[in-house]
Amino acid sequence: MNPPNDRTSNSQKVLDSIIRAHLKEQAPYEAKSFNPDDISVDTKLRNLDGNENPFGPSPLVGKAIAASEELHLYPDHLQKEMRTALSGYTGVHSDNIIVGNGCDELIDLLIKIAIDPNDIVLEAVPTFGMYSFTTKSHGGQVVSVDRTETFDLDVPAILESSQKSKMIFLASPNNPTGNLLPWEHLKTILDLPILVVVDETYYEFSKITFAERLNEYPNLVVLRSFSKWAGLAGLRIGYGMMHSSLVEQLLRTKPPYSVSKPAEIAMLTSLKDKEYLLSNVDKILNEQIRMATLVRSLPRWKVWPSHGNFLLCEHREYTGRFLTEYLAKSGVFVRPFSHPRLQNSIRVSAALPEDTDALIELLSLLN
Ligand SMILES: Cc1ncc(COP(=O)(O)O)c(C=O)c1O
């Protein structure tokens, strides 16, 4: 870059005055915690920090995309084929389904259609960071209600905070704590006059859903993803199930082609090969159980029970940041958190047996 002259410093001022003030102040989303460039080239990298699927997509996906003769065409903005296929998979009517560029896009769209500047969105922390990140980027206010000692919802505190809010996000299983949302808690919250978004991104691992409650509660939205169980995190496919009037509004607001043609092909192919993908889910769950047993057998570790493809592991002395850096130096990437309750915790994704073995070997060297 050249040193700034009058013209460039003036353009910088003009650009600064154009960008919305609240966005300039917003901290970026912390997606990856460690830079792989800092690691020596011969170290094997193990990505246990993104809850990605170590088996990848169905082998039929790459073949189907390569064989497509429609990559030069825009995808169907009304998503007819995908919504019909998802209706077969979920048992929910296609009028009540919408597909997005990852579950992240649906979180974004729901906030976009509901939240005026300064409207309140509730969340129960610790939880997935995109609910607050996206709310803030749309100029909304986030009210974060602390979970209890066992990471369950503090329902009375939520009811109290709900009075001025428009919507709440509840993940089940919750990321990063791994616990489920009990129906008794959800039922109480659904009686409030707010939009209740239940994020079931890890549904295929927990096998527990609230989708069958959609007919009873028009204010319920259930979100799901193909990133985890179907190994399509890189292609970005999520979907939401909700009242048909909400689907219509989201379809009107959504950029029409945000779900790409390759993503559409990948999703349809994954549903055709779901037995294979669900057998991988079983393997990942077995590995999650084995990893929990092994970490628990090490001194000073607590492992929270999890219904997802990840474990929240808490150490009695070391901070999550220290543990993350220590493991990353040997190529094992895990996720630390800034929430005060998770100061000494890391989230580790369940992957292949050799990944667990490498993790355990490193953790057992700590003293
Ligand atoms: C609870 C939760 N919701 C949503 C997402 C994002 O899903 P997608 O990859 O479909 O955008 C994640 C990803 O980690 C998640 O943990």
Image (cartoon, helix red, strand yellow):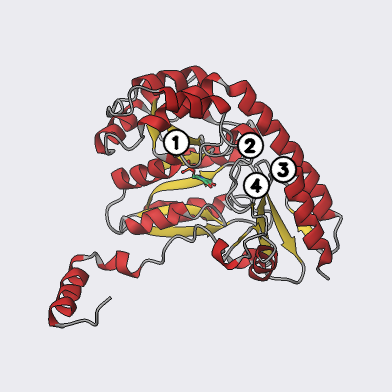
The residue that label 4 is drawn on is 178
- The Cα atoms of the two marked residues, 2 and 3, are separated by 8 Å
Q: Is residue 97 above or below residue 314?
A: above
**What residue sits 70% from the left and 38% below the top?**
284
Judge by depth and name the residue closer to the eye, 47 or 160.
47
Would the CB of label 3 be found within 8 Å of ligand 1? no
Please identify, in this view, whether the residue under mark 4 or under mark 2 is nearer the observer: 2
Would the CB of label 1 be found within 8 Å of ligand 1? yes
The residue that label 1 is drawn on is 237
Q: Is residue 106 above or below residue 4?
A: above
The residue that label 3 is drawn on is 352
Judge by depth and name the residue closer to the eye, 63 or 55.
63
The residue that label 2 is drawn on is 55
Q: Amino acid at mark 3?
A: Leu
Q: Is residue 141 left or right of residue 324?
A: left
The quarter of the picture where residue 296 lies is bottom right
In the rendered structure, find residue 181 and report the number of the disc placed on it.
none
Q: Are marks 2 and 3 in contact (CB under 8 Å)?
A: no
**What residue sits 34% from the left and 20% below the top?**
80
Judge by depth and name the residue closer to the eye, 74 or 321.
74
